[in-house]
């Protein structure tokens, strides 16, 4: 009896050790900042993955972090080895995290040409820094033209057609035809890029005062002051209220705006117009990409990459498109009959063809405050476009020099 009890006790004590020696159960911690539909989609992907891997001893567990605290949480925890195995992140933080070290695991070892080719090229570019891939692209977002079908019979394909459509609609709507937060540099970038403008020269070297950037600002001012197709005081709140009240027939915005449109508004989506003043070049909005990374300190890198591949592959992409309402970076999904008939996903996919991946270099985070000041000074007539951009250039160049001294 005593011998049997000791045998059972020994078995109970050694079972965890045997499991560990054989690989044992592995729980992968995944952090994200999703809410609503995106969170529901991610939860469904994880449930499907866990069911498929039921006998492998690997299980994925999700942890939601408030989106406004997410990047700071990653920065504070991952390098110390107390964060997740996997996290979903925005591309604009990639360069900074790579430069700071011990945050993102380079994935080149896991990748072959077949994996690389399954993504829309620009989305993989957004996950690449100094020649190495640090995350697999999950989804992308771009702004496009959203219009009220009752007020616009045919969406304008050029800025000339845009002005003509606005003049035709003006008597019923007052002076506002088009509305978007044009003092937000993220939105303005689409017009800047049409002129061949830029924020960096190779190096990267800040180039906010490039002549092309000045020309884009001058056209924006003409739209506000002379053509009067834009409201004098833009904001995201005003954009929503004017469009829902039928006082603005067109909006430049992204997928996040669709949930704010009133149910009674019959709207459509179309590509942003080409710019006659820039030689007919298309407006080229910045593409923002969310990637899925393996944390550098993770002790389960192979298992983690397996889930990253699943989430960004055909199974995960379809769920995140249908349930999460994301535009997947996984290119073949757009040939799936169920996805192909989704007009909203198709419209943003079309706009992505002319989009430019937003720079992911560490210096990018230093642009926003100076450019916000410049945009406000220009639109409020406190400074000329050239002078305001020169001031922004000086401020960013100083901050960049300080950053590089610290490295």
Image: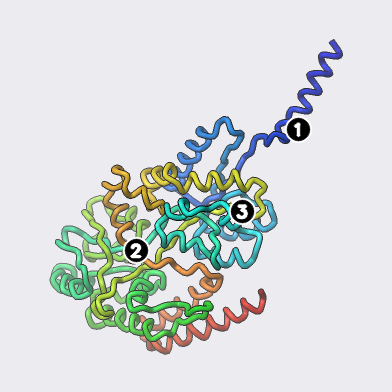
Q: CA distance from mark 2 to mark 3?
A: 30 Å
Residue ID at (61%, 53%): 295
Q: Nearer the viewer, mark 2 or mark 3?
A: 3
Callout 1 touching callout 3 (CB < 8 Å): no
Residues marked 1 and 2 touching at CB (< 8 Å): no
Please indicate whether residue 380 sits to the left or right of residue 158 in the image: right
In whole angstroms, how far apart are the C-alphas of marks 1 and 3? 26 Å
Place of residue 14 in the rendered image (x, y in percent of width and height, measured from the top left): 78, 28
Furthest residue toward right: 2
SS at mark 3 in the image: loop
**Residue at 50% of width from left, 78% of height from top?**
202
Badge 1: residue crowd in 10 Å (few <14, some 14–19, many ≥20): few
Q: Which residue is mark 3?
A: 295
Q: Where residue 143 is drawn, which disc sits there?
A: 2
Q: Quadrant of residue 177?
A: bottom left
Q: Earlier in the sequence, mark 1 or mark 3?
A: 1
The reply, left or right, for residue 402 in relation to residue 116 is: right
Q: Position of residue 21 (x, y in %)?
A: 73, 35
Q: Could you tell me how far apart the alpha carbons at marks 1 and 2 are, in whole angstroms? A: 53 Å
Please identify the quarter of the rendering in which residue 191 is found: bottom left
- Res. 73 in view: no
The residue sitting at 48% across, 50% down in the picture is 34
What quarter of the picture does the C terminus occupy? bottom right
Mark found first going from the N terminus, 2 or 3: 2
Q: Residues within 10 Å of mark 2 (few under 14, many from 20)?
A: many
Residue 305, percent from left and from top: 56, 48
Q: Does residue 126 appear to the left or right of 69 in the view shown?
A: left
Image quadrant holding the N terminus, namely top right
**What residue is disc 1 on?**
17
Secondary structure under tag 2 reads loop
Left or right relative to 335: residue 27:
right
> Is 299 situated above or below 381?
above
């Amino acid at each position: 009896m005593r011998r049997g009890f000791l045998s059972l006790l020994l078995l109970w004590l050694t079972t965890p050790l045997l499991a560990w020696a054989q690989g044992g159960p592995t729980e992968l911690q995944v952090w994200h900042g999703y809410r609503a539909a995106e969170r529901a989609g991610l939860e469904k992907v994880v449930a499907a993955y866990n069911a498929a891997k039921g006998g492998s001893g690997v299980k994925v567990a999700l942890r939601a972090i408030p989106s406004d605290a997410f990047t700071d949480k990653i920065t504070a925890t991952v390098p110390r080895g107390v964060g997740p195995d996997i996290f979903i992140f925005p591309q604009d933080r990639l360069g900074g995290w790579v430069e700071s070290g011990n945050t993102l695991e380079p994935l080149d070892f896991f990748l072959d040409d077949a994996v690389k080719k399954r993504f829309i090229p620009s989305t993989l570019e957004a996950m690449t820094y100094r020649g190495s891939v640090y995350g697999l692209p999950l989804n992308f977002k771009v702004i496009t033209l959203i219009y009220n079908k009752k007020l616009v019979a045919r969406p304008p394909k050029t800025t000339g057609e845009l002005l003509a459509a606005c003049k035709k609609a003006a008597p019923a709507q007052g002076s506002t035809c088009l509305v978007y937060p044009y003092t937000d540099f993220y939105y303005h970038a689409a017009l800047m890029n049409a002129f061949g403008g830029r924020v960096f020269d190779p190096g990267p070297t800040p180039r906010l005062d490039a002549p092309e950037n000045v020309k884009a600002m001058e056209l924006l001012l003409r739209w506000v002051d002379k053509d009067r197709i834009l409201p004098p005081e833009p904001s995201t709140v005003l954009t929503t209220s004017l469009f829902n009240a039928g006082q603005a027939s067109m909006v430049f915005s992204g997928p996040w705006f669709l949930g704010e449109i009133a149910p009674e508004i019959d709207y459509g989506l179309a590509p942003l117009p080409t710019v006659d003043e820039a030689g007919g070049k298309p407006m080229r909005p910045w593409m923002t990409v969310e990637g899925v990374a393996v944390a550098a300190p993770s002790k389960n890198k192979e298992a983690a990459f397996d889930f990253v591949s699943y989430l960004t592959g055909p199974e995960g992409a379809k769920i995140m498109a249908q349930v999460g309402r994301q535009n997947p970076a996984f290119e073949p999904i757009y040939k799936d009959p169920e996805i192909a008939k989704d007009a909203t996903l198709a419209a943003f996919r079309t706009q992505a063809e002319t989009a430019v991946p937003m720079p992911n270099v560490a210096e990018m985070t230093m642009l926003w405050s100076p450019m916000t000041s410049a945009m406000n000074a220009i639109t409020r007539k406190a400074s000329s476009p050239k002078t305001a951009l020169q001031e922004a250039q000086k401020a960013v160049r100083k901050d960049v020099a300080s950053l590089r001294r610290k490295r």
